[in-house]
Amino acid sequence: MTTTPAYAVAYLRNVRFGEEIIDYLKRIDATMDPYGGRFLAHVSELVGLEGEWDGGVVIIEFPSMRAAQDWYASPEYAAILPLRTENSDSIAALVGGVPEGYRATDGLATLLAATP
């Protein structure tokens, strides 16, 4: 059995860019390294297609959901988390990935079983 990747996804709005956000940015990479985290997107160019996109998106890949959860719960990340949350309007989630070659219909049986 192979482990599928997981992703930390954050949507940031109204970032109050100052010393605390700079400190957060200087320290976040070191918190991810022990858990195999790497940036896939970091408030990069965003082309909104539907709805209002008035912020930036951050996506961090981890080798597994366990690694992502351990990173978020780590003392190192907990120490810098308020630097982001107190200086931006943001929401974040951990999202499980899918195996290589996954097709939308692969999850159809699960979705149909969950439909009342």
Image: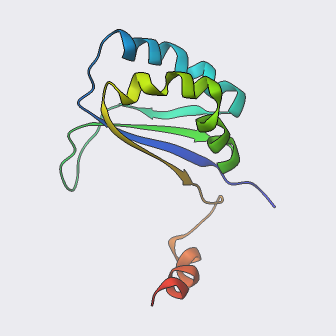
In the rendered image, the vertical position of residue 56 relative to residue 110, given as above or below: above
The one of 78 and 30 positioned closer to us in this rendering: 78
Residue 19 location (% of width, % of height): 36, 9
- Expressed as whole percent of the image width and height from the top left, the position of residue 17 reads 29, 17
Q: Residue at x 62, y 33 (%)?
A: 37
Q: Nearer the viewer, residue 82 or 66?
A: 82
Q: Residue at x 62, y 28 (%)?
A: 32
Q: Residue furthest top?
A: 19
Relative to residue 51, is residue 77 depicted above or below?
Answer: above
Q: Is residue 17 left or right of residue 83?
A: left
Left or right placement of residue 29 versus residue 41 in this view: right
Viewport quadrant of the C terminus: bottom left
Residue drawn where x is 55% and y is 69% of the image: 103
| Residue at 23% across, 47% down | 48
Residue 83 in percent (x, y) is at 42, 21
Q: Quadrant of the N terminus?
A: bottom right
Q: How many marks?
A: 0
Position of 8 with respect to 58 (left or right) is right
Please determine whether, in this image, residue 105 is positioned above or below residue 58: below
Q: Position of residue 45 (x, y in %)?
A: 30, 33
- How was this image coloured? rainbow
State the residue in front, 107 or 55: 55
Residue lying furthest right in this view?
Answer: 1
